[in-house]
Amino acid sequence: MVNETSVPPQKPTTLQGWVRLLDHVTLPVPQASHDRVCKAIADNRSSLRDIADLMQDSPALALSVIREANQHTHGSMTGPAENLEVAITRLGLKRTQELLARLPAMPEEQIPVALRQLQLISQHATQQANGLFASRLARLWQDIHWGSLLFLSPLWPMALTHPHLLEEWELRVIHKHESAAKVERELFGVHLLELCQTLVELWRLPIWVLQGYRLLRSEQRELVKVLRIARDGDHPLRQQNRLDDDPTLRRWLNQPANTVLLANGLALSAHQAWDSPHSQRWQWLTSLYLQMPMDELQQQLHQQAAQSARQHDMADLWHPAEALLWPWGTHHLHRGQRPAPPPTTEDLAKWRKQCAELLVEPSPFSNAMHLTLAARDALAACGMRRVMLLVADRNLANLRAHQTYGLPKECANLNLTVSQSTVLQRLLAQQAQVRLTPANNAQFSALLPNSLRGLFGGDHLLLRSVASNGRVVILIVADQGGGPFSDLTVQAFGKTAQCIEKALHSFTNRGR
């Protein structure tokens, strides 16, 4: 099985390749959730409902159990397990315990941010689905709940193995408005919707999840027709008349399965901005589906988002409910556009300790790899989300990756030819710093190697060369996820670079 510490050296480029990779990824589970579920299973007083309720706290755990149950019943006359209680019943407690023992459990903060962020969107979608639809369709609440939670689950393994590709997709498609088909062909070699639908079929996920992807892929004409009617929200009687004139379209719109797609559309688009065109389209569609005035719907959306944030938000993740606290007109800045949060007091204490280790004399480092590891940890402690330290060869002709943080494992073998980039030549000629911003990003990105720039999606990046005895030895590349930097982190970055420079000097001149 592939996990977060074992990633294939190259990304797939075909549908079969992606399916093979993502199907074999084992998703990590928060240690606290894992422990609670194990304890409940061992307690004879726990009902299946109790155990299922505890499992819901971890979307990865819920997906793993449902997939395992469906794998064991594949090919039988039994239909797929569409909720956790059915899945646990089919597996039995013994096999459920065996599955739990195989899943990697770790502290929540150690699970990669990209995966936790995507799962947070799924949890937000589930809250919207429960609040908007489940009370109206009470008999179908299980279908609504589990379909909404698992709709984006085909992308969870990709968020673990190739987070930078999803970030690049978001940047180019959502924020730069490039063609999704073109971007997906370049980044993945396949269409994401096709990949998701294939995995949904393979994993035998709830049928409403599959219907949602089928709708997006093959029922776009109906979607466009309904959207035209939905835009006419100021005239509800006219809307109703147009639907009455087309009974087939009205039946198509009113399918209960559409609740899963609507909830995820609302949550995903709110992740970008509440008043973006994407978000407005999903709001219009939901307003028409529920026959609810738009202002009333928006009030409910915001209430459900706040409820979701109270239950699931984490300090290092972005939840759209945060934007509701900002002045209207500025709330469209999402996590990738607003400044990253500054380091906490605890973070800064850890950072100072890391820097103090770099300044110890005589040098405690046994080799260059040992030194760059300490340097990487100091940069991560000051708030950097993605870090790469490259070491120059004796002739300053090549840069080889020595340490990485927050980046895919395959980039650990990165080797750059300095002569192919004027920016790298400048940075290696003498100690210098380059800071990329939206104003200069296009100019500088064109002058950087694609293999390096592609790892750091976003408009904000820091590059700094560090010298020892008058010769550049290390190039630091770092960012805070591609969005604007926290001012405090930039200051700490500069001081960390100075500490690395002193550590290099001490290390190079040891024994002299």
Image: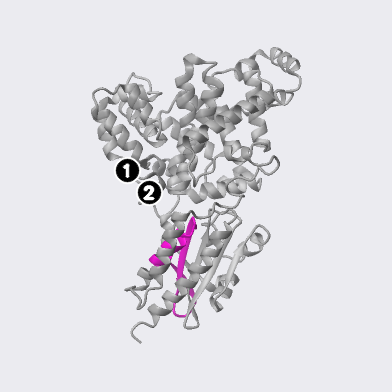
Mark 1 secondary-structure assignment: loop
Q: Nearer the viewer, residue 319 or 14?
A: 319
In the rendered image, the quadrant that contains the C terminus is bottom left
Q: Is residue 450 visible?
A: no
Q: Which residue is mark 1?
A: 104
- Left of 188 or right of it: where is 28? left
Magenta region: 372-401
Residue 345 at x, y percent in the picture: 47, 55
Residue drawn at (41%, 47%), measured in percent from left and top? 109
- Left of 26 or right of it: where is 94? left
**Which one is earlier in the sequence, the residue at label 1 or at label 2?**
2
In the rendered image, the quadrant that contains the N terminus is top left
Specify the quadrant of the image occupied by residue 48.
top left
How is the rendered protein coloured?
Answer: one colour
Specify the quadrant of the image occupied by residue 286.
top right
Residue 313 colored magenta?
no
Residue 354 at x, y percent in the picture: 40, 64
Query: Could you say which disc has been placed on residue 4 in the image?
Result: 2
Kind of residue sitting beneath label 2: Glu
Residue 442 at x, y percent in the picture: 65, 60
Residue 387 colored magenta?
yes
How far is disc 1 from disc 2 in space, using C-alphas? 9 Å
Q: Nearer the viewer, residue 219 or 126?
A: 126
Is 174 situated above or below 475?
above
